[in-house]
Image (cartoon, rainbow, N blue to C red):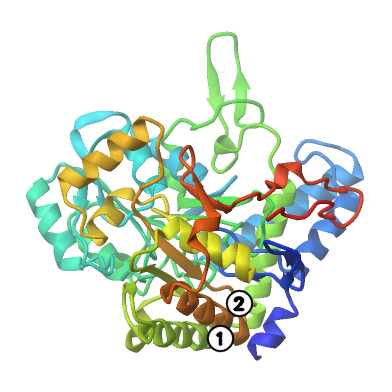
């Protein structure tokens, strides 16, 4: 399959968007590390479900029985996709990865004498929930965001048996670095410690096998999201040991999570039901499963080849632009990285670069700290004194000078022409071929917009059909 063939599988990739002035261009979405559009197969499956949708579990009606079977089949598909062992693992269907991590963290009692070991490259979602459970210990990483198993070994030795969990990302959402998760699992298990993997950035790109090749490589907990896997319907999963979930009280409590309820006592249901209280997001689960089936149908080799072509082209092109700094592994190390590329343009704030790309070139990227502020601060070489000044300014409500980077990230549907557009646009910015004076920064958000720009909220959206932008930006 070519990139063009893969593009035909995605909803909404041919939309034209307005630019500053009266121009229009096809939208180039290079912000897939944040969220991906839907696969057509996912949309079709959700549309089919909606014709038969009903509340799942305990409903005697035909539609309820059908929806329940659909929901449970989705659970099986998630387990198969993740390489989970049905005799060992249990799949809890959640809203997203953040929800999954928070649910897992809630199962660990607060203990300031015990630690959870994370890495310095973690997304805030795999950092902040653990701070509520006790001490958080960070494994140092390379400038590219690589977690070295030897560093994990040294960290666990220093903890001297006080660590109770290792929780690390499978791939950095900042630099795209793929982590050696099974090597890290062996280190953790040699110390008698379970390991959790945040696979939000990994699962849509690289096959995950929770069971590994042997007991030492087994991934104990895996968390992932549908919205980064071409299923933006609010589905996610927490996969872990059935025995572990059975030994802990539920993270969320309510209907559906119980066997027996008395006035002053409760018997919780078995996993996974005990951790799925309330009416579940059936559409999200079905969408997630449909995306997983489609990704498997396409094949990991096809997806990897397409992503490598775009990533190599982009990295090599950025390297030729004077004034551009790229962070992370290079074009010669594609087997250890995803198509997630962070960069900066000398002398141009990251937020201004992103604004120019959007308003003048129709390219969507992300900028900022990517919910990984501690790592970004170190990656950019910001000393503590400067970092404190930035933090003080943000606390005072001024985001104008917040440090960060620009991030371009590829999905299976992106094509080489879009990379060429990005490279041409970045080269223009680096050469100063844009009117800096026309852009204004909003101190409350740190975002740049062209003078006279009409925010999206002032546009009239026709929700009974395709959204029509009824007003144009005024420049």
Q: Which residue is mark 2?
A: 412
Front-most of residues 368 and 154? 368
What is the quadrant of residue 405 in the picture? bottom left
Q: Is residue 206 left or right of residue 1?
A: left
Quarter occupied by residue 43: bottom right
Q: Please state, as top left, top right, bottom left or bottom right, where the C terminus lies in the image.
A: bottom right
At 51% from the left edge and 70% from the top edge, which residue is drawn?
409
Q: Is residue 157 above or below residue 257?
A: below
Could you say where residue 215 lies in the image, as x and y percent from the top left? 32, 66
The residue where tag 1 is placed is: 306
Tell me the crowding category of disc 2: few under 14, some 14 to 19, or many 20 or more residues within 10 angstroms, Cα based: many
Q: Are marks 1 and 2 in contact (CB under 8 Å)?
A: yes
Q: Tell me if residue 312 comes above or below residue 453 in the rendering.
A: below
The front one of 439 and 150 is 439
Q: Residues within 10 Å of mark 1 (few under 14, many from 20)?
A: many
C-alpha separation, residue under disc 1 versus residue under disc 2: 7 Å
Residue 99 x %, y %: 51, 42
Q: Secondary structure at mark 2?
A: loop
- In the rendered view, would you say 296 is above or below 232? below
User: What residue do we see at 10% from left, 59% from top?
Assistant: 154
- Would residue 226 be found to the left or right of residue 197 on screen? right
């Amino acid at each position: 399959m070519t990139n063009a063939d893969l593009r035909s599988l995605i909803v909404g990739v041919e939309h034209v968007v307005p630019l500053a002035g009266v121009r229009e261009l096809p939208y180039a979405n290079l912000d897939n590390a944040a969220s991906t559009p839907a696969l057509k197969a996912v949309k079709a499956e959700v549309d089919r479900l909606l014709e038969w949708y009903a509340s799942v579990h305990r409903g005697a009606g035909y539609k309820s029985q059908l929806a329940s079977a659909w929901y449970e089949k989705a659970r099986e598909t998630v387990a198969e996709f993740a390489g989970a062992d049905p005799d060992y693992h249990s799949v809890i269907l959640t809203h997203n990865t953040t929800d999954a991590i928070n649910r897992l963290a809630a199962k660990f009692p607060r203990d300031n004498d015990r630690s959870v070991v994370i890495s310095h490259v973690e997304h805030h979602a795999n950092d902040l929930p653990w701070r509520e459970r006790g001490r958080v210990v960070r494994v140092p990483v390379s400038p590219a965001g690589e977690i070295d198993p030897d560093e994990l070994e040294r960290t666990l030795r220093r903890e001297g048996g006080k660590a109770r969990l290792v929780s690390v990302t499978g791939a950095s959402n900042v630099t795209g670095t793929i982590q050696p998760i099974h090597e890290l699992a062996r280190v953790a298990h040699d110390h008698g410690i379970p390991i959790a993997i945040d696979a939000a950035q990994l699962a849509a790109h690289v096959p995950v096998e929770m069971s590994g090749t042997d007991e030492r490589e087994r991934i104990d907990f895996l968390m992932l999201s549908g919205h980064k896997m071409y299923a933006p319907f609010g589905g996610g999963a927490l996969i872990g040991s059935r025995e572990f979930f059975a030994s802990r009280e539920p993270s969320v409590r309510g209907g559906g999570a119980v066997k027996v309820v008395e006035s002053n006592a409760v018997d919780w249901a078995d996993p996974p039901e005990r951790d799925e209280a309330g009416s579940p997001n059936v559409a999200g689960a079905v969408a997630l499963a449909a995306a997983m089936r489609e990704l498997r149908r396409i094949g990991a080799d096809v997806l990897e080849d397409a992503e490598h072509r775009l990533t190599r082209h982009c990295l090599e092109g950025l390297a030729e632009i004077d004034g551009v700094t790229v962070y992370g592994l290079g074009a010669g190390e594609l087997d250890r990285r995803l198509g997630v590329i962070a960069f900066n343009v000398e002398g141009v704030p990251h937020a201004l670069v992103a604004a120019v790309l959007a308003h003048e070139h129709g390219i969507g990227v992300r900028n900022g700290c990517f919910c990984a502020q501690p790592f970004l601060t170190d990656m950019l070489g910001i000393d503590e004194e400067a970092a404190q000044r930035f933090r003080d300014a943000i606390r005072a409500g001024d985001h104008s000078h917040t440090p960060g980077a620009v991030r371009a990230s590829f999905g299976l549907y992106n094509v080489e022409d879009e990379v060429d557009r990005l490279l041409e646009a970045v080269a223009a910015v680096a050469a100063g071929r844009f009117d800096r004076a026309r852009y204004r920064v909003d101190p409350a958000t740190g975002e740049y917009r062209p003078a006279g720009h009409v925010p999206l909220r002032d546009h009239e959206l026709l929700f009974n059909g395709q959204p029509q932008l009824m007003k144009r930006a005024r420049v």
